[in-house]
Image (spheres, rainbow, N blue to C red):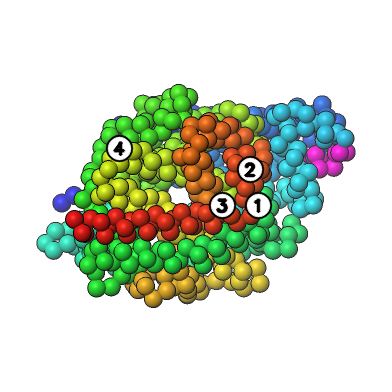
Amino acid sequence: MKTIPLRKDVDEALTWDLSGLCKDTADFERQLQDCQAQAEKLKSDYFGKLDNAENLIAAIKTYADLTAKMTRLGTYSHMALDVDMANAENLSNDARFQTVYAEILSQLSFIESEAKGVAQSVLEKVKEDATCKGFVDEIIRNKPHMLGAEAEKVLKALTGNFMTPYKVYNQAKFVDLSYPDLELGDEKVPFDFVAFENSYDGTVDTATRRKAFALFSEHLAKYQNTFATALNAQMQQEKTIATLRGYDSVFDYLLFEQKVTREMYDRQIDRIVEDLAPAMRKYAKLLQDISGLDKMTFADLKMPVDAEFEKKLSVAESKTYILDALSIYGAEYKDLLVRAYDERWIDFAFNQNKASGAYCTAPYGGHPYVLLSWSGSMEDVFTLAHELGHAGQGHYSTMHQSIFEESPSLYIIEAPSTLNELLMANYLLSQNPDDARFKRWVISNMVGKTYYHNFVTHLLEAHFQRACYKIVDGGGSLSAADFNRLKLATLQKFWGDDVEMAAGAELTWMRQPHYYMGLYPYTYSAGLTVATAVNQKYLSEGESAIQNWIEVLKLGGSLPPQALAQRAGVDVSTDAPLKTTIDYIAAQIEQIIALTEQLNNK
Ligand SMILES: [Zn+2]
């Protein structure tokens, strides 16, 4: 019988090569000690001496260099852990990094504290230096919320501890939580969290899909109290920091970081839950009709509209799709994509104890890395296009901005990635423009995957998350029963009577890691709103829209998200782009319905 392989048994060609960051644990330790020495020297050179521009510039520049080195080491240790969370060496390196990182942050917290007290005229002078500008801007912006030097030092020393809820979540989910095989008739197939989310969640056979969902939920439920304790702790510690730093609410604290107004945040959640729900219920009804189901349940929503086109693709085939679809970006971008494959920047392997989902990190001074678990579906190709969108963003911003300004606000972080999914859909549509069935398959992939994931799955997480934070903000705390109740209420509000909430739907809050990253879930819909507008520009104006978008990517985080969107020609000061996007999704669903009728009447 087949089993899910251990990390040590997977094909090396499918794994990423981290040697550009660290060769091995000994090299990791040596680099870490170099950073410790550099931090000590920085402190002994400048502690108590940052009252003038010259010293401040020199200290910030050294700090920038050190931060980049530490970012690369942190990227190495957490990525190595993510592909094998049960590995003792990986766990030890990651813990070691957290300890040293917190130690250095605490030791060097004096730079921010002393800079805060420096005269405005000196800060203005320091800002003229390109490396220092972003650092100083943040000092000025954060001044009203900064605590005394000793308090800041203590908080920085606890940095690693603040990560504990997320670490507990990951260990419980990917190491402790184990599944028995899934029994399909006489056959037993290996099953785990990633296998469910990558395959069985959207499998076309209804009996298999529902059985998989029941098995998935039954075992997930056993950890609901562990997960709930971790998630409540995460939310409580954010509330504590918000209060200590003098924010009116935990929302104000988390949105301040993103440079986003409460109105921009609430608008995404309220408009989508109200205005997109009718269209998505229609989509659910269509899935039900096509499959001839007696009822539509929560376990059926990921079904494909037309399974016939769901062919298996190899990694090599994915490269052709990616290069062809994204070639409109030009030679520099294409070179990046080729290198991503040829130099093993991507971890395709599917193995035990590996993080689920997909992500991309682009450490400053290094190249981007992508994690996913390749199952060979067209959905994986879209996921790759998505993650390589983050890679492109990271490439341009780290090339053109200082480490303090390279990262854009979370509000817009999902725009480059989701734009690539839309470009992939454009490309596929152009391949067979006159084939109605193929056209329906592409559009339904866009609606059922890209828009579903970003405007429904993540947005409903955001709706649930907001309800949780409101309770925490009012001084309350949350248990597993509370999380289940709130998640179910969100799902029922959106799907109404059109989708039956299968037992286990209430546990959906246990599936995503984004709750450990602040107000992240809503940003997927914000990013895709901007991406949809940019794609419309591309379709009407041509490649100049894409070249302009590259210029926006180069700006990194040097502008707030609203100004960045403006540079891309999208005005998010009002809800107009969001309304246009919701109308666009509704129109795509109508088109799938019309194409289905056309195909049925043939
Ligand atoms: Zn993303």
Q: Is residue 118 magenta?
A: yes
Residue 431 is labelled as: 4
**Any atom of ligand 1 within 8 Å of the CB at mark 2?**
no
In this rendering, position of residue 207 left or right of residue 557: left
Rendered location of residue 529, percent (x, y): 52, 50
Amino acid type at circle 2 is Gln
Mark 4 and mark 2 in contact? Answer it, CB < 8 Å: no
Which is the main secondary structure of the residues drawn in magenta? helix
Residue picked out by circle 1: 573
Between 290 and 48, the one lying in front of the other is 290
* Disc on the earlier residue, 4 or 3: 4
Residue 566 is labelled as: 2
Q: Regarding mark 2 in the picture, which secondary structure is present there? A: helix
Residue picked out by circle 3: 577
Q: How far, Cα to Cα, is label 4 from label 3?
A: 29 Å
What residue sits 23% from the left and 55% below the top?
Answer: 599
Amino acid type at circle 4 is Gln
Rendered location of residue 564, percent (x, y): 63, 41
Q: How far, Cα to Cα, is label 4 from label 2?
A: 32 Å
Q: Quadrant of residue 280?
A: bottom left
